[in-house]
Each structure stands twice: as C-alpha cells, then as structure tokens.
Amino acid sequence: MGKIAFVFAGQGAQYSGMGQSLCEVSPAAQAVFDTADKLRPGTSQQCFTAPAEELSITENTQPCLYCVDLAAAKALEEAGVSPDYVAGFSLGEIAALSFAGVFAPEQGFGFVCKRGKAMQAAGEANPGAMAAVLKLSNQQVEELCAGFEKVWPVNYNCPGQLVCAGEKSQIEEFCKKVEEAGGRAKLLAVSGGFHSPFMESASQTLKEVLEPLELSEAKVPVYANFNAQPYTQAAAKELLVDQVKSPVRWQETVERLCGLGVDTFIECGPGKTLCGLIRKTVKGVTVLNVQDGETLKAAVEAVKAQG
C-alpha cells in the first residue's frame, strides 16, 4: 500500500444535519464539537438543524464546516487510520492545519470564526461573483481574464475546470466570452469574490488576528493552497494571510501528492466535491470520503483491506 492523504472539504459542501452521525459513533468527533460549543455556543446545533440558508452565510459556514471536516479526520485517526500528508480546499486548509497541530484546538476554531466574519465583511464591502469555467484550458481562461480589469482566475480545481472571480457585471460579460470561445461557464451561488483581490481587507484583518498567535510546527506535512508546497512554521502566518486573496492551486496540490507516493485520498467533511476533482486529475488512485458514521466505517474497512 502507498501513502494516504487526508483532504478537507471547502465552502459550498455544507448541508443541514452534517456532522451529527459522526458524533454518535466517535468520541473524538464529539470532542471537536464540544470545543466549538464552548467558544461559540450553538455551533453543533447549527450544523445539525439549521436550514441551508442559514448555513450558507459565510460567518456560519466556515466554523460549522471546519468542525465537520476536523471531526471526520479525528474519527478516522481514532479508528486507526492516519495520513502521511494533509491538504484542504480553501476553508478546509484551516481544518487541515488544526489536524496537523499547527493550531491548538481552541486556537484553530477561534481563528476560523474570525476568518468567516472577515471574508463575509469583505464580500459585503466589495460585492463580487464567481463562475466555474469548463471545457477550456487554464491558459485559455487566463487569457480571457486578462481582457477584463476585475476578473481573475482563482480556483485551479482540475483539468478543464477553473473558477474565476470578479466584479458581478464583468463576470457576466466574461461568461459570454467563455461561451464564444467554446467553453461553458456556470455562475456560483457565493457571497463574494473569494481568493481574489476583493478579499484584501479580509487578508489584512487576518494578519492582525494572527500576529499575537504562537503557531506550532506541523506534525504531518500540510500542503498549502497558495503554492502547493508544505507549510513551514516560519511561513505559516504569511501563507494564511495570502491564502484568502490568492488562487487555490488544487490540481497542482493533488498532482504533487501523487508524486510523493499517495495512492489513497480520503476526503474529510461533507459531500464528495474533492473526490470528484481528484478523480478528474489523476487516475488509478483510491478515493474515499468520510462525512458520517456509514462512510467512516466504509473508509476504515477499505484502508484496512488494502493492508
């Protein structure tokens, strides 16, 4: 058997009821929610019972999703499955860093709460839009973006899928150009132009939040969205500040992990979005997900069956 990577789900994967089943079968998962409820009362109930509209508000989405991501990974670890590497998509990177011990438990949750509020505020101050572009090469999309003052490529998801962010009126015009070039563009239901210069104010807020914090060396390598390279203790704060306003290099991260010998990816958190992106990026790897008691059991059995 090769190496294992845990990958942590990002914003957009949330759904009402997420995490509850994990807490029923895993004390380690329950402990994640206990920490959250102590710092932000009602977080677990928000995950378990809040309607989709409430969970889609960024300052709610981020702490809730973080808890489910981290709970899934802790439940796996409790069951005897440990990763050789970890990475997270956008918000998921904070859960990955907490799992790896860069953030202490209360520190990580406190940071993600402030991150959610900062990104929501930036989105309200600079209303933006995002669109997924399909069926074009990255170079084609980058060239189309260059024709607009306020449209940028932001999420390099997998071959043939690149998400762009920018000013709403320009994104709509950009989508027309994509169609004319033979691609397909789909507007996303988001509250801001994430991972673009529109998040500069959030980046500055997080710089101030991080300044007094003592971050630890990662116990397992964490691959960063910013450059698809492992975090170092010295650069951790700078990477976290840059991450919210810079592109997510997910395809490159997955390819790099495969090059390091990873042949099993386990998506931790709600949904299977990252599973789909990984399958479109590399062939011949095992892709699993853990989001509830049933998928936890299946993933543990699958890993143990591999030897």
Image (cartoon, rainbow, N blue to C red):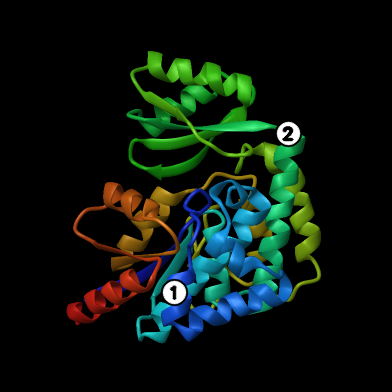
Which quadrant of the rendered structure holds the C terminus?
bottom left
Query: Nearest the camera: 79 or 25?
Result: 25
**3D distance between C-alphas at marks 1 and 2:** 37 Å
Q: Which residue type carries mark 2?
A: Asn
**Quick one: SS at disc 2?**
loop
Q: Which mark is residue 22?
A: 1
Q: Position of residue 259 (x, y in %)?
A: 31, 61
180 w.r.t. 132: above or below: above
Label 2, on which residue?
126
Q: Is residue 99 left or right of residue 270?
A: right
Q: Position of residue 305 (x, y in %)?
A: 18, 79
Going from N to C along the chain, the mark reached first, 1 or 2, is 1
Q: In the rendered structure, are the residues bearing label 1 and label 2 in contact, judged by CB atoms less than 8 Å apart?
A: no
Q: Which residue type carries mark 1?
A: Leu
198 w.r.t. 120: above or below: above
Q: Is residue 126 left or right of residue 293?
A: right
Whether residue 216 appears in this view of the structure is no
